[in-house]
Amino acid sequence: MTPAVFIAILCLGVASGAPILDPSLDAEWQEWKKKYDKSYSLEEEELRRAVWEENLKMIKLHNGENGLGKNGFTMEINEFGDTTGEEFRKMMVEFPVQTHREGKSIMKRAAGSIFPKFVDWRKKGYVTPVRRQGNCNACWAFSVTGAIEAQTIWQTGKLIPLSVQNLVDCSKSQGNEGCQWGDPHIAYEYVLNNGGLEAEATYPYKGKEGVCRYNPKHSKAEITGFVSLPESEDILMEAVATIGPISVAVDASFNSFGFYKKGLYDEPNCSNNTVNHSVLVVGYGFEGNETDGNSYWLIKNSWGRKWGLRGYMKIPKDQNNFCAIASYAHYPTV
Ligand SMILES: *[C@@H]1O[C@H](CO)[C@@H](O)[C@H](O)[C@H]1NC(C)=O
Ligand SMILES: *[C@@H]1O[C@H](CO)[C@@H](O)[C@H](O)[C@H]1NC(C)=O
Ligand SMILES: *[C@@H]1O[C@H](CO)[C@@H](O)[C@H](O)[C@H]1NC(C)=O
Ligand SMILES: *[C@@H]1O[C@H](CO)[C@@H](O)[C@H](O)[C@H]1NC(C)=O
């Protein structure tokens, strides 16, 4: 063994104890911390900086020199920049639900009926602004309010942001666990049995659990039931085209999902039958030529407007149920 190899091994050992940071990234680090409002204790800062540098390297590698990434899918060093892949997965295990497959088909489609090539319910005014769940795992509640907000328009003609906090605080007796965990199915059941849901204006989001203070006088939305869709992208497409935004769940457990910036999301190991994050499908379409196979679902996330495409993401469509997009889909009836 040459001394050089010996030294190299020794250096590695030291490196894992105290991270070696790249001083040329100092300015970028300060800027990132400011942008995402991060502050740390002295010891924590060093560790987080090391994680951030690793992520930055991975993201730069992914995005490549032309900055386009694979299939035009690019990542960004966003608010998850100081999070390891393992930590990100832990955050996402928030939602390990059984996927219900007994849903009924909506069966409106005459054989061969044709749906629009592009659907975007935002353009029709059926989608409220993107919100930010913060440190509360209430994605399930954002997904459900999003679907009810849209269906309520058919009744009232108005787009009213509904209360996520109402669901977080009040659907515990049905089995949801506030900021820890929740199931959209149970949230719909709560709204149905409760006979209403308040608006964001009267029951604003706090990002932490509180005592239920639902007041029926302030109810702004009621549902008559909800439908679970069978696991099928064709049926999901029919529902998105004819009914409105649909609440779904996806496998979001890879940090590539967290760092998503734009393009069609890609992750070789994304599951097509297990889910751990709830979102809202607000449309679908394709990039380039229709025959290129670059179809996507347009999903609304609850990680703020700084994430992804101003809070949205394009997930590949008609690719064997990529990321399990059609495995757990629901919509409310009003
Ligand atoms: C995502 O959720 C499924 C359960 O629905 C679980 O089996 C899977 O391990 C989760 N992913 C991670 C990395 O936790
Ligand atoms: C996908 O999963 C395989 C087997 O678990 C693993 O070896 C591989 O590194 C994973 N690929 C990515 C990109 O995560
Ligand atoms: C679509 O395909 C046609 C014919 O193959 C080609 O002429 C055209 O440039 C393509 N358009 C795009 C947007 O890729
Ligand atoms: C999941 O992927 C496998 C292999 O790609 C495919 O055979 C299966 O049909 C997919 N499941 C669904 C529900 O599409």
Image (cartoon, grey):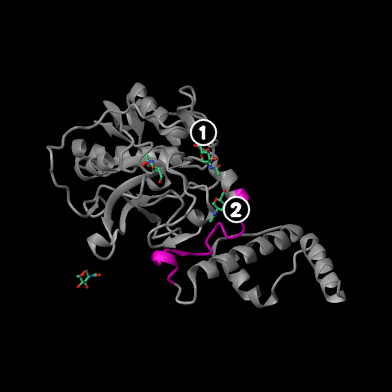
Dot 1 lies on which element?
loop
Q: Which residue is mark 2?
A: 85
Mark nearest the camera among 1 and 2 is 2
**Label 2: few (<14), some (14–19) or many (≥20) C-alpha neighbours in 10 Å:** some
* Rendered location of residue 160, percent (x, y): 30, 43
Query: Which residue is painted at 81% across and 67% down in the image?
Result: 9
Q: Which residues are magenta?
A: 68-87
- Give the amino acid type for the residue marked by disc 1 in the picture: Gly
**Label 1: few (<14), some (14–19) or many (≥20) C-alpha neighbours in 10 Å:** many
Asked if residue 37 shows in the view, the reply is yes
Magenta: main secondary structure equals loop
Q: Which residue is mark 1?
A: 178
- Look at the image and tell me in which quarter the C terminus lies: top left
Query: Which residue is painted at 79% across and 63% down in the image?
Result: 18
- Look at the image and tell me in which quarter the N terminus lies: bottom right
Q: Quadrant of ligand 4?
A: top left
Asked if residue 162 shows in the view, the reply is no
Up-down: is 16 above or below 132? below
